[in-house]
Image: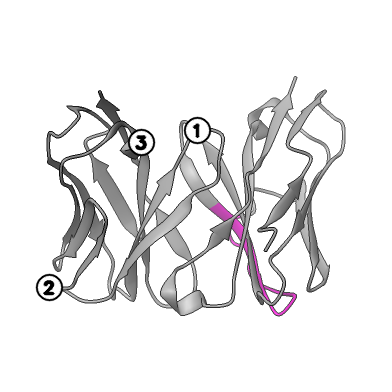
Amino acid sequence: DAGVIQSPRHEVTEMGQEVTLRCKPISGHNSLFWYRQTMMRGLELLIYFNNNVPIDDSGMPEDRFSAKMPNASFSTLKIQPSEPRDSAVYFCASTSRLNTGELFFGEGSRLTVL
Amino acid sequence: EDQVTQSPEALRLQEGESSSLNCSYTVSGLRGLFWYRQDPGKGPEFLFTLYSAGEEKEKERLKATLTKKESFLHITAPKPEDSATYLCAVQEDGSRLTFGEGTQLTVNP
């Protein structure tokens, strides 16, 4: 199994630009999560989907952030416009066994907004 | 709101020197407590799930235990390859996992 695949691995952009992060979950997994990790705040849940439907987006910081899951094998997290405080590592995770807490994380997308 | 506090923030051990990491939590109804390991530049990797007080899980040199207020991750005779950040997370009702800020473990040869 290829695991959770995220792209890009690194992105450097300027304030005000649109950023799109992509995630391909593990085949057969029906739950998908977007997390953000920073030194100051640790690992924070932004949004999660179950069967392609957004279930909890209460962690999405503000309207500049949006996430979609058009099908079971693809999800995007978009930031428009980006700001320096959005700089972080963004992780996507998936699971087919939500009640066990066993999430499979991708290697993350490191975003730097100048 | 769920609170998860891990201590210490960082821990340095000599190879073979056993120790424990702590995760204390405050949730109104714990559904599960989870331990993850994170290596630099990588995503967290699942280690254990604990559901109820008194439960224990083991994997190689690691043993996780759970009480009503906290969990411990015991590391017996650690090796340099055990160096990583160890994260705990709790799940209350629903599916949200709330993570602690982690303990950065360094094991020197």
Mark 2 nearby-residue class (10 Å; few <14, some 14–19, many ≥20): few
Is A95 situated above or below B19?
A: below
Which of pointers 3 and 2 indicates the residue nearer the eye?
3
Task: Identify the magenta region.
Answer: A45-59
Q: Nearer the viewer, residue A10 or A46?
A: A10
| Quadrant in the picture for the C terminus of chain A | top right
> Label 2 belongs to which residue?
B54
Where B71 sits versus B12, above or below?
below
- Image depth: mark 1 or mark 2 in front: 1
User: Of marks 3 and 2, which one's residue comes earlier in the chain?
Assistant: 2
Residue position for label 1:
B40
Rendered view: A32 above or below B43:
below
State the count of labels: 3
Tag 3 residue: B81
Percent coordinates x, y for residue A98 in the rendering: 51, 75
Q: Nearer the viewer, residue B53 or B109?
A: B109
The picture places residue B100, in percent across and down from the top left corner, at 36, 48
Q: Please state the chain letter of the residue tagged with numbered disc 3 in the rendered image.
A: B
Mark nearer the viewer, 1 or 3: 3
Q: Is residue B40 magenta?
A: no
| C-alpha gap between disc 1 and disc 3 | 12 Å
Q: Residue drawn 42% across and 75% down?
A: A100
- The kind of residue tagged 3 is Glu
By what rule are the colours in the image chosen?
A: one colour
Q: Please state the chain letter of the residue tagged with numbered disc 2 in the rendered image.
A: B
Q: Are marks 1 and 3 in contact (CB under 8 Å)?
A: no
Taking the image as drawn, is residue B1 in sight? no
Looking at the rendered structure, the kind of residue marked 2 is: Gly
Q: Are marks 1 and 2 in contact (CB under 8 Å)?
A: no
As measured in the structure, the alpha-carbon distance from the residue carrying label 3 to the one carrying label 2 is 28 Å
Residue type marked 1: Pro
Left or right of B32? Residue A65 is right
